[in-house]
Image: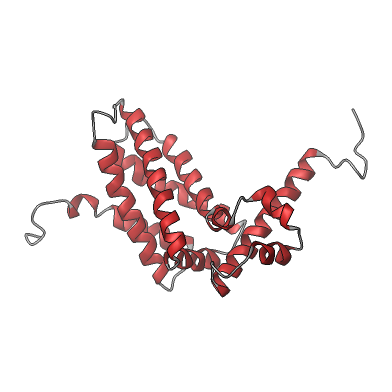
Amino acid sequence: MATPTPHTAPAGLRERKKQRTRDALIRAALELFTEQGYETTTIDEIAEAVDVSQRTYFRYFANKEDVAFAVQETVEARFLEALAARPAAEAPLTALRSAVTVAWDDIGDAIESVIPVELYMRSFRMIESTPALIAAHLRRSSEMEEQIARLIARREGLDMDTDPRPRVLVAAFGGVMRVAGQVWGEGQECSVASIRELTKSYLDHIGPAMEDDWRAR
């Protein structure tokens, strides 16, 4: 076995260094975006904040949009993993709700390993108030909902080309998640526990909200 030299660091060490650089770029970018605006922040400023070159930045992210949504992509990936792991016997909406509940604990750790939750909240507000990012957010949300619908269809043995239920359910689920995220982002409590409980509460209202007569309650 070759002995690592000062010029050939072990693979594990290299990967950890890459992860630290990527995390530093994300944190620096989100700090700059939320402090001085997404549109006015340049890639050079982000790279300079981490003391790396522009070339190094582009090894990790293709553009500013990619770094703006990097943490959100991690959140979405953890949710998909949690949903795929739900028992096959669970009803679709139960599986979605349970996946959110279970995933948030792991998601919270994943977020906090890169940025403070308070910065995640500020970046959420920044995305919601930046026209260029709102469009990207809607596009990414649509793509994510399609992935979830296909996963639900596979679980239930359905063909989405002939059965609209997976897409209809996920459209309602996605809408609730967006509203819960907006309410959380506008609030004062920025803990992972608060968004988890808020999301659970809103998901509990999907069924009742779809009933015909609200005034009868």
The chosen color scheme is: secondary structure
- The answer to whether 119 is drawn above or below residue 20 in the figure is below
All told, the count of numbered labels is 0
Q: Toward the viewer: 168 or 155?
A: 168
Q: Residue at x 63, y 65 (%)?
A: 42
Q: Residue at x 42, y 60 (%)?
A: 134
From the top left corner, tell me how far across and down residue 194 is, in percent: 42, 63
Identify the image quadrant of the C terminus.
bottom left
Q: Residue at x 76, y 58 (%)?
A: 53
Horizontal relation, residue 80 to residue 160: left or right: right
Confirm whether residue 182 shows in the render: yes
From the top left corner, tell me how far across and down residue 172 is, in percent: 27, 49
The image quadrant that residue 189 belongs to is bottom left
The image quadrant that residue 25 belongs to is bottom right
Q: Toward the viewer: 206 or 40?
A: 40
From the top left corner, tell me how far across and down residue 73 is, in percent: 51, 49
- The answer to whether 90 is drawn above or below residue 173 in the figure is above
The image quadrant that residue 148 belongs to is top left
Identify the image quadrant of the N terminus.
top right
Confirm whether residue 106 shows in the render: no
From the top left corner, tell me how far across and down residue 61 is, in percent: 63, 51
Horizontal relation, residue 188 to residue 54: left or right: left
- The answer to whether 101 is drawn above or below residue 28 in the figure is above
